[in-house]
Image (spheres, rainbow, N blue to C red):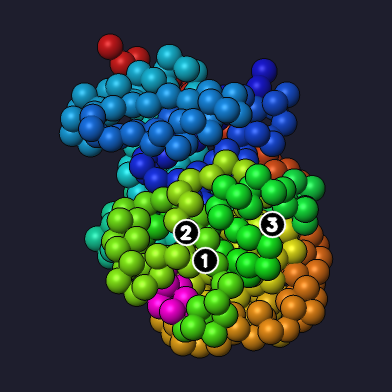
Amino acid sequence: MPLNVLHLRASTGFGGAENIILSICQNLDPQRFRLSILSTFPNRYENSFLAAAAERLEIPYDTLRYSHRFSLTTIRDFLLYLQRRQIDIVHAHGYRENILACFAIYFKNVATVSTTHGWITDQVRKKIDLWALRPLHRILAVSQTAYQELLAYGFDKGKIVLLVNAVDVNRFRKLTVSSPLKNKFNVRNGDFVIGTAARLSPEKGIDDLLRAAVHVVRQCQNAKFLIVGDGPMREALEKLADELGLKDSVRFAGYQDDLVAIYNLMDIYVSPSLQEEMPRSILEAAACERPMIATNVGAVSQVIKHGETGVLVPARQPQRLAEEILELFQNRQLGEQYGQNVRQWVSLKFSESEFMEKLATIYEEVFAETRPKEKLKPHTQIN
């Protein structure tokens, strides 16, 4: 019998974590695992992007709504859901999800796994997350930096597994861009497209990219900036673009399904983040042979080797970012070489097939480790 694995996600946005969840649900062996997604939200919220993507990919998806996040009613409904769906493993993706996973252990003896997608600057949430992670059976670190940080916080080495984000290089590859796609985003022949794909939140540094764009368009009139993604800062960023006089040069594309085509529309991919672990978008753009410019944060330097597979710049320096964009605009041959090199690198070091097999082994191990406890502590029935 396949193991029932539930991915738990509470975000209302769509970013790297959501893409990873969808990829896992699509690509793990269905003979060994039955995968599904549960989103938890206050009554007034939803994640229409994740729900639509799951429906399109025929991945089972449910929503658990609540009035108060960790009320007895919410916990009861969650435990009943686990019981009704006969969930064997809960895979949590965030601090709120990790708290719910703790209840899955204490009341249902369900095996638990959590992926640490990176902590933003909110120290209160980080402290809560570090507390909630401790009872869980496995913690997946998406970068060496995250792995070392967990060790520094005193986590048991046997619980932490380094599982670096990966990419399907057969799906994400260099393609010829169709005319309808160019027309959709008002890209004309001869335009030079600088793009990024990210959740529009403060730590992604999109405001720095807009400030860099001011310098770029002064010297390159056919430069177009394409910003893919959605999030809480979209309205503020659109307003900033207008204030900077970029209305005709910047396009906010929102959430897009066909990222392979979108990446191939870009002549340069830029990641201006202030904080990252191992961003999946960089791996995807790299697999599409896009010349890369990124801020040197988190584990980005494991993908982009400065002067070999792309360009690294310090965070919060839009002038420097603009200079590097203009350099690649003027030296297309160098950009092409970076694109070829970075695809070769991610194909070698960030294989999705190896990622999936390693994750499958983790699931099976953690499930086996929790089974003997059933004899001593049978599942509690929730009425």
Q: Are marks 3 and 2 in contact (CB under 8 Å)?
A: no
Q: Are marks 1 and 2 in contact (CB under 8 Å)?
A: yes
Sequence-wise, the earlier of marks 3 and 2 is: 2
Q: Which residue is mark 1?
A: 225
- Residue 340 visible? The answer is yes
The residue drawn where x is 48% and y is 67% is: 249
- Location of residue 155 with respect to 170 vertically, above or below: below
- Residue 115 visible? The answer is no
Going by the numbered disc 2, the residue's amino acid type is Arg
The residue drawn where x is 31% and y is 16% is: 382
Q: Image check: 180 left or right of 219?
A: right
Going by the numbered disc 1, the residue's amino acid type is Phe
Residue 84 lies in the magenta stretch: no
Q: Which residue is mark 2?
A: 251
Residue 303 on image: x %, y % = 67, 70
Q: Residues within 10 Å of mark 1 (few under 14, many from 20)?
A: many
Numbered-mark total: 3
The residue drawn where x is 62% and y is 39% is: 24
Residue 280 on image: x %, y % = 59, 56
| Callout 1 secondary element | strand
Q: Residues within 10 Å of mark 2 (few under 14, many from 20)?
A: some
Going by the numbered disc 3, the residue's amino acid type is Asn
Task: Find the distance from the CA under tag 1 to the CA under tag 2.
Answer: 6 Å
Residues shaded magenta: 206-214
Q: Which residue is mark 3?
A: 264
Residue 118 on image: x %, y % = 45, 60
Report the front residue among 67 and 144: 67
| Callout 3 secondary element | helix
